[in-house]
Amino acid sequence: MNALHKISDFFMTPAMKIVMILAALLFPFVASNEYQIYVMALAFVWAIAVYGMNIITGLCGQLNLAHGGFFAIGAYTLAILTVDHGWAFWWAFVAAGIAGALLGFLAGVVSLRLKEHYFAIFTLCVGFIIYLLIDKWEELTHGALGIINIPAPSGFGLVDFTETTPFYYLALVFMVLSIWLAARIANSLLGRSFRAIRISDELAASLGINLMRNKVLAFVLSTTYASVAGALYAGMVRFIGPAEADVVHTFDMITFLLVGGIGTLMGPLFGTLAITWLTQSLQFLEEYRMIVFGPLLVVLVIFFPRGVVGTFLTWRGRRLAAAHETAQKESASEKKSPSNKATTPRNQEAGNHA
């Protein structure tokens, strides 16, 4: 048990972050083939989008079911600007992030007037509208044919992002930046405002928090994350179609959050990596893999409702609280013992006089 406690304490130290970064940097050298590097890079891209969903859902408590649609907006913005209009990749990449933020602002101003399941249903409709626009607006999006020959990110010097390993490190850099920004947001006054809104709108309003402004800001941050991830995805796979806006992707990201831990910092990354590699390992089962994957997911949600990372943090918090309580009791008993020792001789002396 002491070894387990030491391991759990190590997970919370800055040294663990260094170990994780080193492991990510060395992964291409220990991977058995290029496909594994490709899968890991793809998981990093999806993790960026999941961190965006964690801001609006995990921190602010608003379930956005249009998140996959904004992922597709980022992908299509980059594809249209580079393929149809000849923009350079990085200028189109910036434009994709801006497009996601602007459209997220417009959707958020309207949808966030609703609450709870009404908001979720409205955003589900928004996501379906995005899908229909991409599928039917052939003059702009090429319709069901999709867009091919999307350029990869522009390299520099000897770095060529059309190759798998350089793109892996590019995705890693963007993911680390995304986690760093998410951590800054979560630990800031803005993050505490988001968490107050998640607990109760009335509580947040009583604290002087502007509900609409903070909800819209959380929504815009989440859609920006999704659009940036979508733009990276388009530059990675080099072909996109209307399926990128399918609501299935939104529910995939919700699954990643549930497994990792909603509202935690490392939950989105852990959930994305775990589910991605689990599905890859079950590929040999083909269409039957859901027979194995489905029950595993149900068991995980039942016994770990806060996700793996959330459950670990809860267990560690209880352990530290129990240790603190034990230390307080020992300190109190030590304070009482000297007084007892001091009174004992006096009682004996009084007995002798008697």
Image: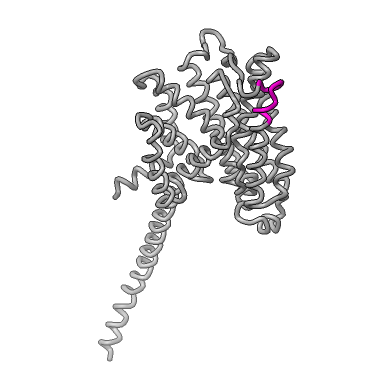
Q: Position of residue 207 (x, y in %)?
A: 69, 56
In this view, the residue farthest toward the left is: 352
Coloring applied to the structure: one colour
Magenta span contains residue 3: no
Q: Position of residue 251 (x, y in %)?
A: 53, 40
Magenta span contains residue 139: yes
Q: Quadrant of the C terminus?
A: bottom left
Q: Nearer the viewer, residue 160 or 353?
A: 160
Q: Position of residue 322 (x, y in %)?
A: 39, 58
Q: Give the residue at x 67% y 55%.
A: 201
Q: Position of residue 163 (x, y in %)?
A: 48, 13
For the image, the number of numbered tags is: 0
Q: Give the residue at x 64% y 21%.
A: 78
Q: Nearer the viewer, residue 122 or 96?
A: 122
Q: Give the residue at x 72% y 37%.
A: 105
Q: Which image quadrant is residue 291 in?
A: top left
Q: Which image quadrant is residue 277 in?
A: top left
Q: Which residues are magenta?
A: 133-142
Q: Which image quadrant is residue 21 in?
A: top left
Q: Nearer the viewer, residue 314 or 124?
A: 124
Vertical position of residue 159 compared to residue 267: above or below: above
Specify whether 50 is left or right of 38: right
User: Magenta span: helix, strand or loop, mainly?
Assistant: helix
